[in-house]
């Protein structure tokens, strides 16, 4: 990774302008779309630069990484909203409920039950999204589309989870539009207001197709260093 610091404030402004333009193209307003800055594997100084530029909504993929990063930032910056956007293991549920404001990756009954139990125990109820595996990929998390209607109802009726909406990650090599349209129709059917879809490569299209939340990392922070 280059040692050169990206101009994160400028990148944020550019992404927000593109969101606004995409929304305008379909008669929406930019305020209908929340930008989630994805800080996974990014150096703290880059995340701090986004905070200093006014960004307050962030996404993290791993509970452990977020646990080491965000308590300190929350001591310095007010109004942070933190989204878990990566797979959640049941043994991390207590930490996730304590740390995150939104858990976007509810994808199986065992996890839904564990979340419900922890929320009942602590009284803390972060909003939840159900992740739908729209591409039916074996290696990807998410409830299958054929099972999603029943699972949504189960999460609401049996587990009493605060389900706000749906999220998806289309297959890398697929045209994303059908996946976004499928998720939008599913959310409409269940009267769910939140649609988390779209990342750095396709967030403008996602906005045009109804996204209320887009998850953008590299377009803001630059390439990740996984080394």
Image (tube, grey):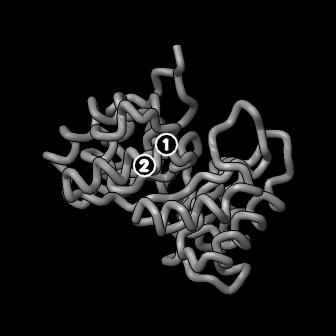
Say whether residue 84 is left or right of residue 220.
left
Q: Give the structural element (helix, strand or loop) at label 2.
A: helix
Q: Is residue 131 visible?
A: yes
Tag 1 residue: 110
Above or below, 76 relative to 198: above
Residue at coordinates 21% horizontally, 51% vertically from top-left?
121
Above or below, 41 relative to 215: above
Q: Residue furthest top?
A: 227
Residue at coordinates 69% horizontally, 63% vertically from top-left?
206
Gap between marks 1 and 2 measured at Cα:
5 Å
- Name the residue nearer the viewer: 46 or 78: 78
* Percent position of residue 90, x then y: 42, 35
* Percent position of residue 137, x then y: 77, 38
- Callout 1–callout 2 Cβ contact below 8 Å: yes
Determine the image quadrant of residue 180.
bottom right
Say whether residue 72 is left or right of residue 119.
left
Residue at coordinates 30% horizontally, 60% vertically from top-left?
125
Say whether residue 227 is left or right of residue 92.
right
- Name the residue nearer the viewer: 143 or 60: 143
Residue at coordinates 63% horizontally, 45% vertically from top-left?
142
The numbered dot on residue 113 is 2
Q: Is residue 55 visible?
A: no
* Percent position of residue 45, x then y: 33, 33
Q: Residue furthest left?
A: 75
- The total of numbered circles placed on residues is 2
């Amino acid at each position: 990774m280059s040692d050169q610091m990206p101009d994160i404030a400028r990148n944020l402004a550019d992404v927000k302008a593109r969101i606004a333009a995409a929304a305008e193209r379909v008669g929406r307003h930019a305020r209908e779309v929340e930008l989630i800055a994805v800080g996974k594997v990014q150096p703290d100084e880059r995340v701090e630069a986004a905070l200093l530029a006014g960004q307050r909504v962030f996404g993290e993929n791993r509970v452990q990484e977020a646990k080491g990063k965000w308590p300190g930032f929350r001591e310095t910056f007010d109004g942070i909203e933190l989204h878990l956007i990566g797979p959640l293991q049941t043994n991390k549920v207590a930490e996730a409920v304590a740390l995150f404001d939104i858990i976007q990756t509810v994808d199986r009954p065992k996890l839904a039950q564990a979340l419900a139990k922890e929320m009942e125990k602590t009284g803390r109820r972060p909003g939840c999204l159900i992740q739908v595996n729209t591409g039916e990929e074996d290696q990807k998390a998410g409830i299958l589309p054929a099972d999603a209607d029943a699972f949504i109802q189960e999460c609401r009726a049996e587990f009493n989870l605060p389900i706000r909406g749906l999220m998806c990650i289309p297959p890398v090599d697929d045209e994303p539009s059908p996946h976004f349209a499928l998720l939008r129709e599913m959310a409409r059917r269940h009267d769910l207001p939140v649609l988390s879809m779209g990342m750095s490569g396709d967030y403008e299209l996602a906005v045009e197709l109804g996204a209320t939340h887009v998850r953008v990392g590299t377009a803001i922070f630059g390439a990740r260093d996984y080394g």
